[in-house]
Amino acid sequence: MTNVEVETLDSVRRRLVIEIPAQDVTREIDQAFSSLSQTANVRGFRRGRVPRAVLERVAGDKLRAEVFDKLVQDSFLDALREQSIDPVGHPKIETESAAQSGQPLRYSATVEVKPEVEVGNYKGIAVERPLRPVGDADVDGYLEHAQQSAARVEAIEDRTETRDGDIATVDYEARVNDKIIGKGDDRLVQVGGDEPHEMGAHLGGVALGAETDFVVTYPEEFENPDLAGKTVHFQVTVKAIGSREVPPIDDDFAKAYGGLDTLELMRERVREELEAQATRSADSAARESIVEALVRENEFEVPQAMVESRADGLVSEFMSNLGQRRPPASQEAEVREQLRKEMEPRARTQVQANLILEAIAKLEGIEISDEQIESAINQHVESAGASGERLRSLYAEPSARFGLRLQMLREATLDRVVEKANIQTVEPTDEENSSVAGTPGNG
């Protein structure tokens, strides 16, 4: 019978010392050699007739290593079940005494586990809810943004040379040391500007149909790593010139871009949207403040494996949102490693917050039913459109359903804490209040 000793190293680490009896080790090795003898092809011997001594010489070390690996894996999993230990991350396994002939196999496995979280007072947490008032200036800004988004380019027929403010249609090619790094056809570029790294700054006074060459040296800190610090030679052909025409903000604008009969009705709709957005933002800020308070008031050690896993997730989310600004493949590993270091504190806080919410869920008796899971999956599938069935097949996996259940449990628990919180609605500071709320949509 395998012997298991458990040592508590700290609140998140357990060390298991596992000893497999000599007779079990011997039996497994004998069985392995027996199986090998039935399949081994050794010159000078018939299959199934290869002596054990010959097999020992040609494959003994490799076979024993495989047997030891299997014994460790099987006994480790059995030990976890026996001791009711649910590890997070991979174990650190060290052999303490390798099994010799007639000797037991003894090894240790150090694992991280979720800590036992004892939550302090989570009822009546006092936080502020910064609700931004929506004024006429916000409505005006929203409509002006929508107006600019609705602008159209009208061809200029009575002039054949570009001027500042024109919209030029161009074909271009960009090279670094005769290597093409960028190419485009029928690109719209606004002519003029004071930024030398912008193409439009070099297109003033170019004749229609003419080609112009210019060189741009990008600063070392330029946001696009493919261009930072490089000198790029551009060849640009101006194919057409036009002017940017914006529609007036009037009743016709309300009908065309808001689907409403009058500008006044559109202004009312915009105000409602901005107020709803301000409400959502205020509610989100209050929830974030409550989570911060929970983390601040409940300090405990967090398993490093969980922190690293969450940091990896944050890095992947960040990289997927970079789009065209994503670093080249040759630099991605280095960038990921740097981001992982920068995001580790944030990941640690998120893991701590999640563990606190799970502990509160137990105290409050909050559970997520299978019916709630199915309802959430159906909503996700419906909103996913064409990729909905692929999403449904993903949620057929137990791990995906478990992750969704855990996410829903945490959200439901935070809802409960918010209900019990002492929330005071306040107006944001001037700095927080300075940005225009919202971006234009279709009414």
Image (cartoon, rainbow, N blue to C red):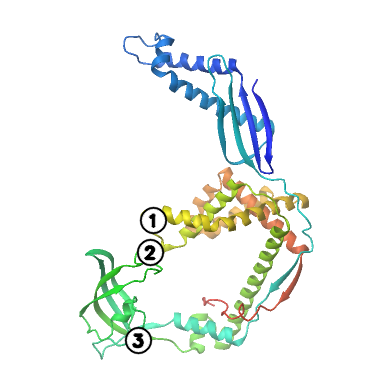
The residue positioned 66% from the left and 45% from the top of the image is: 114
Which of the 4 image quarters holds residue 93? top right
Of the two numbered discs 1 and 3 on the same chain, state the one appearing first in sequence: 3
| Residue 333 x/y as whole percent | 42, 52
Residue at numbered disc 3: 165
Dot 3 amino acid type: Gly
How packed mark 3 is, by other alpha carbons closer than 10 Å (few <14, some 14-19, many 20 or more), is some
Q: Is residue 262 visible?
A: no
> Are the residues tagged 2 and 1 within 8 Å (C-beta)?
yes
Q: CA distance from mark 1 to mark 3?
A: 38 Å
Q: Is residue 163 visible?
A: yes
The residue positioned 29% from the left and 80% from the top of the image is: 202
Of the two numbered discs 2 and 1 on the same chain, state the one appearing first in sequence: 2
Residue at numbered disc 2: 225
How packed mark 1 is, by other alpha carbons closer than 10 Å (few <14, some 14-19, many 20 or more), is few
Residue at numbered disc 1: 331
